[in-house]
Amino acid sequence: AVYSILFLALSFVARAEEIDPQHELLAVARADDPVHPTEVIGKKDLLTRRGSPASTIKVALALMALQEKVIDLKSSYLCSDRTPVPSLLTLQQAMDLSSNEFFEQLVVNLSIPRLENYLGRWKYFPLLEKTLPPPPRIARGKAFTVSPRDQLVFLSRVVLRRLDGVSRTSYDLLDQVLALAEKPGLFGKTGSD
């Protein structure tokens, strides 16, 4: 259930076919609608256009930190970017709120060499810079460029537990971090801060 949206996106991309070469539109077949057998889902060039991964980098950072035992489910960091007053946030709370301050501290504790090692092995960012920038740019996903296709491939490897050097325990902990609350709230931001 945690990854249902990801699987939906993956199935759309996997079934997408070019239906209008002139406009490079992608579409998926719709078995439920005989009158409109295909549904346009986007422009082909957008699938490979590189941009900032923004907060989606936080899934990778969380998995690295869990694997390296830099943090566990009870660990917390003091953050003030997503709460009215500075508050201690756990990894799950920081993920729910998309706290940049939390993940900046996490990057510092992970260390740049370990971060580069994982990113290189996982090939999430094919155009990884030789020298990583300071933690705030990394935590905000502004240190790299990645295409939607690259993101889907990476996240599918997370879902399928096929990343090099990650233990079953770390995947299980990540599942707990990403699990939805009984009564989930709606959180989000534009990524422009």
Image (cartoon, rainbow, N blue to C red):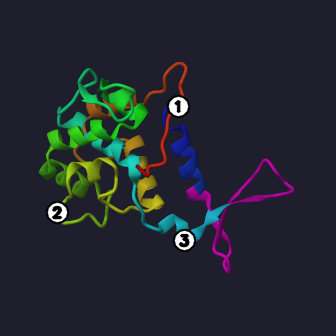
Q: Is residue 25 magenta?
A: yes
The span from disc 1 to disc 2 (Cα, nearest Å) is: 37 Å
Q: Residues within 10 Å of mark 1 (few under 14, many from 20)?
A: few
Q: Which residue is mark 1?
A: 1
The span from disc 3 to disc 2 (Cα, nearest Å) is: 29 Å
> In the rendered structure, which disc, 3 or 2, sits on the residue that comes first in sequence?
3
Is any part of residue 144 visible from this angle? yes
Q: Amino acid at mark 3?
A: Asp
Q: Residues within 10 Å of mark 2 (few under 14, many from 20)?
A: few
**Number of the front mark, 1 or 2:** 2
Residue found at x 58% / y 46%: 8
As helix, strand or loop, the secondary structure at mark 2 comes to loop
Q: Which residue is mark 3?
A: 45
Q: Amino acid at mark 1?
A: Ala
As helix, strand or loop, the secondary structure at mark 3 comes to helix
Q: Residues within 10 Å of mark 3 (few under 14, many from 20)?
A: few
As helix, strand or loop, the secondary structure at mark 1 comes to loop
Q: Which residue is mark 2?
A: 131
**Number of the front mark, 3 or 1:** 3
Q: Is residue 172 magenta?
A: no
